[in-house]
Amino acid sequence: MNSFKYCYGPVGSWRLGVSLGVDPVSQPEKVCNFDCRYCQLGSRPARQPGRAVYLLPDELGEELERIKAPADYVTFSGRGEPTLAANLTELRLECVRRRPERTAIITNSSLMYSAKVREELACFDFVIAKLDAPSVGLFMELNRPGVGVYFEEVVRGLILFSKGSRGRLALQTMFVAANRDQARALARLYADIGPDEVQLNTPLRPCAERPLSREELGAVAAEVSAELSRLGAGAIRVINVYGEKAPEVEPVSAPDTLLRRGKTRGIKKDI
């Protein structure tokens, strides 16, 4: 059986097509400066936003060489926040050297205040950045950030990143009961930030929060689209997890993939 420490998948993704995962902070426990209420990895106190080296480029390269399956993207995501890897640039370059695919990263946006991190992220072909709340109070309630992570800095960093981004930027929002009625307020932030795309999600993997139904999330999407149009930002594409089809893909190592992604509740969907 194939076994991998840093790579997983490929998986079928509703937003990335076929995605080969790279976990740049691969550890037995999640490494994250958020403790989101809906986290599929369970609750664990959020750590402070310091960065560290968790794996070396050569270690990643050895695993990438063993994976022959093609993909649309090599995606940095996994058991924590990928921007906490201090050698993110070196790891991305190793992927570019070893694989022909475009690179993507899924981030919680916590370090967007840092010009250095924004510069590192700008080298990815596709950045998917979290924004779950339109206010400090809801941000603290839903994302439960660690010490040193501030909502205002997250939003300011996203605006600066969007202005200087060379690749594609998507904002992703995980909708649960707590932020279901914040669609219009979030749409105003989307318009201020100006991404290429907004991805509306709801937790389809087992966690502490109930997912919105297809009808509920569809109503949210309609509210978001209407508000963006009213604000003159109707060119921003709005997609949702129920409305996009993920390709069927066989992972090279199912246990390593399950470790990062968990099981879905009755519907096959991606990272």
Image (cartoon, rainbow, N blue to C red):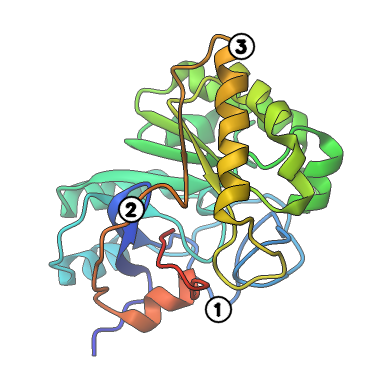
Question: Outermost residue toward the right?
Answer: 137
Quarter of the figure with residue 229: top right
SS assignment at label 2 = loop
Residue 191 left/right relative to 62: right
Tag nearer the camera, 1 or 2: 2
- Residue 41 position, x and y percent, is 60, 71
Image vertical order of residue 52 relative to residue 65, above or below: above
Disc on the earlier residue, 2 or 3: 3
Image vertical order of residue 156 relative to residue 8, above or below: above
- Residue at position x 66%, y 51% in the image: 50
Label 1 Cα crowd, 10 Å radius (few <14 / some 14-19 / many 20+):
few
Q: Which mark is residue 231?
A: 3
Give the residue at mark 2: 245
- Residue at position x 55%, y 64% in the image: 204
Give the residue at mark 1: 28
Image vertical order of residue 85 relative to residue 235, above or below: below
Q: Which mark is residue 122?
A: none
Q: Quadrant of the N terminus?
A: bottom left
Distance between mark 1 and mark 2 Cα atoms: 31 Å
Q: Of residues 244 and 199, which is closer to you in this image? A: 244
Image vertical order of residue 259 relative to residue 169, above or below: below
Residue 91 left/right relative to 189: left
Label 2 Cα crowd, 10 Å radius (few <14 / some 14-19 / many 20+):
some
SS assignment at label 1 = loop
- Residue at position x 61%, y 64% in the image: 31
Distance between mark 2 and mark 3 Cα atoms: 29 Å
Q: Quadrant of the C terminus?
A: bottom left
